[in-house]
Amino acid sequence: MRELGPSGGAPLVFLHGVLASSRLWDGVAEALSRRYRCILLDLPLGAHAEAMKADADLSPEGVIALVVEALDALALPSVTLVGNDSGGALCQMFIERHPARARALVLTSCDAYDVWLPLLFKPFELAAFVPGALFVVAQLLRFRFVRNLPFALGWLALRMPADVGASFTASLSHHAWARRDVAKFLRGLSPRLTERAAKSFPAFDRPVLLVWSERDRFFPRRLAQKLLSDFPNARLELVHDSYTFSPLDEPSVVAAHIETFMGVVALDERALEASARPQES
């Protein structure tokens, strides 16, 4: 876990997806850290630098519990959650289970409804069930040209810095514990989880921002439009020159959308506070 920005700023908690790390959010968090407390979590999804305990529950539900544990350790009763890719699916599960702890929600291009994982990444998910298969995949990912293929990282970002791409796959390639940890998560994935979370969306009346990449190869705009219709207080912004990893491709654009949104969140909260005050007779 890393923090940027003033400790008294409104807290933003950033979640990444499988085979990514908090480095995905560096540019966005740096831009927002002038005003906001940016908390970047490194989840045990394959790019993490430290092994989890061998008996740790790293199913999607178990990872949600780790996020709650981190918020408790920071004494944060409620935060704005920001998610990308499968981290966005985790955000959806979080608000289903802990709606009172989400002040607001930001979803950039991500899994939702019947998509978790996208079809092109299903072989990676299936490899988690075959002994030794993740090891073979991990060794192939040592090579930059393999990482740049569509079924790896190639269609996730238009502008993936070489060192960032290498960092996303280094632990998986070098450490059996990284493969063990991410396999637990992959074996627990199911669209049933995102479809179940979606049933809670109409009851979530806090502000929601959808930042969707127009050139996304994996998460079609229909997902964003359905999210927009299902959340009662949502708005949609498009990022024009980006694949799924818009925080890498267009960090300043994503940060600007979030900063504008946070201003709206603050206005909404002040209006709610005013309406809750006793009226003078």
Image: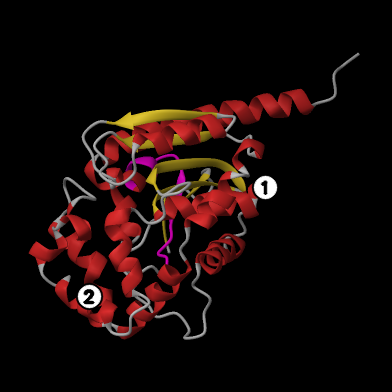
**In the rendered image, which quarter contains the N terminus?**
bottom left
The answer to whether 251 appears left or right of 159 in the picture is right
Amino acid found under the numbered disc labelled 1: Ala
Q: What is the secondary structure assignment of the residue under circle 2?
A: helix
Q: Which mark is residue 138?
A: 2
Point out residue 129 in the picture as x, y percentages from the top left corner. 37, 77
The answer to whether 239 appears left or right of 40 in the picture is left
Amino acid found under the numbered disc labelled 2: Ala
Nearest the camera: 15 or 222? 222
Q: Count the marks: how many?
A: 2
The answer to whether 70 appears left or right of 141 in the picture is right
Q: What is the secondary structure assignment of the residue under circle 1?
A: helix
Q: Is residue 118 above or below residue 267?
A: below
Identify the residue shown where x is 91% and y is 13%. Answer: 281
Q: Is residue 42 magenta?
A: yes
Nearest the camera: 236 or 24? 236
Can I make out residue 19 in this image?
Answer: no
Q: Earlier in the sequence, mark 1 or mark 2?
A: 1
The residue singled out by tag 1 in the image is 100
Which segment did they paint magenta? 30-43
Point out residue 205 in the picture as x, y percentages from the top left corner. 63, 34
The local crowd at label 2, few if under 14, some if 14 to 19, many if 20 or more residues have their Cα within 10 Å, is: many
CB-based contact (under 8 Å), mark 1 and mark 2 = no
Select label 1 or label 2 by which is in front.
2
Point out residue 247 in the picture as x, y percentages from the top left corner. 30, 45
Q: Which mark is residue 6?
A: none
In this view, which residue lies farthest toward the left? 145
Residue 224 location, quadrant:
top left
Q: Is residue 165 magenta?
A: no
Identify the residue shown where x is 57% and y is 50%. Answer: 197
The answer to whether 253 appears left or right of 148 in the picture is right
Identify the residue shown where x is 54% and y is 67%. Answer: 66
